[in-house]
Each structure stands twice: as C-alpha cells, then as structure tokens.
C-alpha cells in the first residue's frame, strides 16, 4: 500500500488517530518520506455531518478524509 501511495505523489496523507493502531502505517509512510498527518478522530465525523455526508462506508470515509484534508489543511 505504501508503494502505491508513493507512486501517486500525494501532497498529504490524512489518517484518523485510532488508539495507536495507525502507528505502524504512520511509521511506514514516514520511512518512505511521504507527508502524513494524524488527525483527531472527533473532528472528522463532525466535518462529515457539516458537509452532509451522513452515510458510512470505507469509500465514503476515505472521501471525507480527503475533503477534510483539503478544507482544514491539518498540520503535520
């Protein structure tokens, strides 16, 4: 997965904090010098509600995280 992301040359990879489960992925992304930021998981559902994205699916969650990253521009 990290190789695939690297070929896309992302400006930023936005992940939600998930009780430490995100840490191996963050480490792998950082090792490949990919720009990664971990955001507060409370902010993303609030952002989703504010933008009218109330359904839940993996694809929708990814879309909301991408939109959150573009709109909020979290530091990381």
Image (cartoon, rainbow, N blue to C red):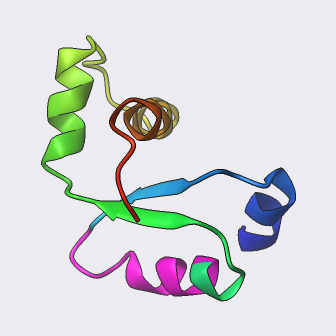
Q: Is residue 17 left or right of residue 6?
A: left
Q: Is residue 63 left or right of residue 22?
A: right
Q: Is residue 28 above or below residue 50?
A: below
Give the residue displayed 18% in from the left and 17% down from the top. Answer: 50
Give the residue displayed 43% in from the left and 41% down from the top. Answer: 69
Give the residue displayed 22% in from the left and 29% down from the top. Answer: 47
Q: Quadrant of the N terminus?
A: bottom right
Q: Is residue 21 left or right of residue 6?
A: left
Give the residue displayed 78% in from the left and 55% down from the top. Answer: 9
Foreground pick, 52 / 71: 71
Q: Is residue 40 above or below residue 69?
A: below
Q: In the figure, residue 67 lies in which quadrant? A: top left
The verdict on residue 19 being magenta is yes
Q: Position of residue 75 (x, y in %)?
A: 36, 58
Which residue of the protein is positioned furthest toward the top in this rendering? 52
Q: Quadrant of the C terminus?
A: bottom left
Q: In the figure, residue 29 lies in which quadrant? A: bottom right
Q: Position of residue 33 (x, y in %)?
A: 68, 78
Q: Is residue 26 above or below residue 49?
A: below
Q: Position of residue 63 (x, y in %)?
A: 49, 31
Q: Is residue 8 left or right of residue 50?
A: right
Q: Which region of the structure is painted magenta?
A: 18-29
Q: Position of residue 66 (x, y in %)?
A: 49, 37
């Amino acid at each position: 997965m990290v190789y695939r992301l690297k070929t896309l040359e992302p400006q930023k990879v936005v992940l939600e904090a998930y009780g430490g489960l995100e840490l191996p992925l963050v480490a792998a992304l950082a090792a490949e010098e990919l720009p990664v930021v971990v955001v507060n998981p409370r902010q993303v559902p609030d952002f989703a509600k504010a933008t009218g994205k109330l359904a839940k699916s993996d694809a929708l969650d990814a879309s909301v995280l991408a939109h959150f990253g573009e709109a909020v521009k979290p530091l990381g």
